[in-house]
Amino acid sequence: MKILQDLSYDELCSLVQDMGERPFRARQIYEGLMQGKKISELPVPAAMRGALLAEYADEPVKIREVFTAEDGTKKYLFELTDGNLIEGVLMSYRYGNTQCVSTQVGCRMGCKFCASTLQGRLRDLTAGEILSEILAVNRSEGGTLKDRKVTNVVLMGSGEPFDNYGAVVKFLRNLTAEGGVHISARNVSLSTCGLVPEMRKFAEEGIPLNLTVSLHATTDGERRRTMPIANRYSIREILDACSYYFEKTGRRYIFEYSLIEGENADMVHAEQLASLLKGRPCHVNLIRLNPVKERNLKGTDERTAQAFLKELTSRGISATLRRSMGSDIGGACGQLRANYLGREDPQHKGEEDT
Ligand code: SAH
């Protein structure tokens, strides 16, 4: 079954024309879909719904379960049309709600601390499936197109966004398009483990979002211990690609650094990180690693994390330590975890001061 939500408004117009239908139907279908409606609920003649349902999935992403934490964080379990399950998280902040979306079923990057890669990558999501995660949550939260309940999006769920490049870029174009969900690229963050060629290519797409890179180490040798992708690209190449992104978009970039006991969290690492990043238009998000039960890596204690933060900031690096939220519902589901779950969102602060 194909996914109708894959289509941009223009593509939908062509489809409606090919079906021999009147042009205004395209707008009706588009608005219905962007409100999270199923095809079977669209306000078009039954014959047209039937023709669409013969080819397209009625509801590509179904909410199977919702878990709500004491702090209001919600974790969603979604079911895809082939029975695969993916997860998403919705976090409330003063300025709105941020949804974390998955881009693949599983992941093949193999990071040693991450739960989403344990079984490898089952398949890529399509652009419309990624968008449908948001459409489903906005609707279930009582949001509409005018009054959205999802105001910010982070691509930090399962999957490596740049390992599914085409679908992710298409999703981002549809997400930010006027007349649709229309979330500004400034309110979107994409996190990558550092696929350098795709980072450079993305700099030229004209989508000025918050580019976030999972660094987690200060030398290539140490990075290779936890992140296999470090065998392909060096930290130097990653930093150069970040500079290129800044040059093309004017957007500062962000590094994720998960503090792992006995691995990357000593004072010497803080010094090395500061000297790597000194003078760069960037921000560092620190988080204490969430233990994944299948892995034997542990996060640092709070004091070590605070000391690491202090060392970085005293050396002139913009950095924040994020708090875990939603842990009582397993909001820390290994990967859909906590580094974006802090009350203070530096990416948002970044928007205010740029
Ligand atoms: N594949 C992308 C995005 C998905 S993961 C990437 O690698 O950036 C989002 C973030 O969570 C990444 O920074 C990832 O390294 C981090 N992460 C994964 N498992 C974690 C864990 N157990 N504790 C803390 N952070 C984790």
Image: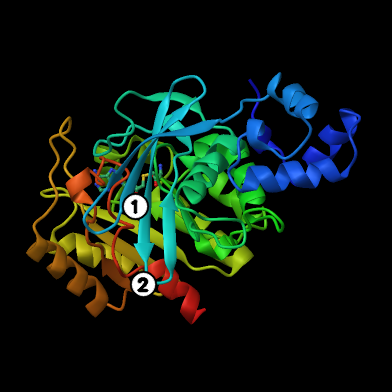
Dot placed on the residue nearer the N-terminal end, 1 or 2: 1
Q: Is residue 255 above or below residue 37?
A: below
Q: Is residue 223 above or below residue 53?
A: below
| Image quadrant in which you'd find residue 78 | top left
Q: Which residue corresponds to the image point at 17% horizontal and 66% vertical from the top-left?
A: 308
Q: Amino acid at mark 1?
A: Leu
Quadrant housing the N terminus:
top right
Q: Which residue corresponds to the image point at 43% horizontal and 52% vertical from the top-left?
A: 99
Q: Which residue corresponds to the image point at 77% horizontal and 22% vertical from the top-left?
A: 51
Q: Mark 1: which secondary structure?
A: loop
Question: Considering depth in this image, is 50 or 241 the residue closer to the camera?
Answer: 50
**Circle on res. 90:** none
Q: Mark 2: which secondary structure?
A: loop
Q: Amino acid at mark 2?
A: Lys
Kindly identify which residue carries mark 1.
215
Q: Is residue 143 above or below residue 75?
A: below
Q: Is residue 132 visible?
A: yes
Q: Is residue 221 left or right of residue 122?
A: left
Kindly identify which residue carries mark 2.
278
Q: Position of residue 320 (x, y in %)?
A: 28, 69
Q: Mark 1 and mark 2 in contact? Answer it, CB < 8 Å.
A: no
Q: Position of residue 83 (x, y in %)?
A: 44, 20
**Can you tell which of label 1 and label 2 is closer to the viewer?**
1
Question: Considering depth in this image, is 101 or 216 the residue closer to the camera?
Answer: 101
Q: Is residue 305 left or right of residue 347?
A: left
Q: Position of residue 229 (x, y in %)?
A: 39, 38
Question: Considering depth in this image, is 186 or 308 the residue closer to the camera?
Answer: 186
* Disc 1 to disc 2, C-alpha distance: 15 Å
Q: Is residue 37 left or right of residue 230?
A: right
Say few, some or many: other residues with alpha carbon within 10 Å of mark 2 (under 14 / 14 to 19 / 20 or more).
some
Question: Considering depth in this image, is 306 or 32 the residue closer to the camera?
Answer: 32
Q: Which residue corresponds to the image point at 48% horizontal and 38% vertical from the top-left?
A: 103
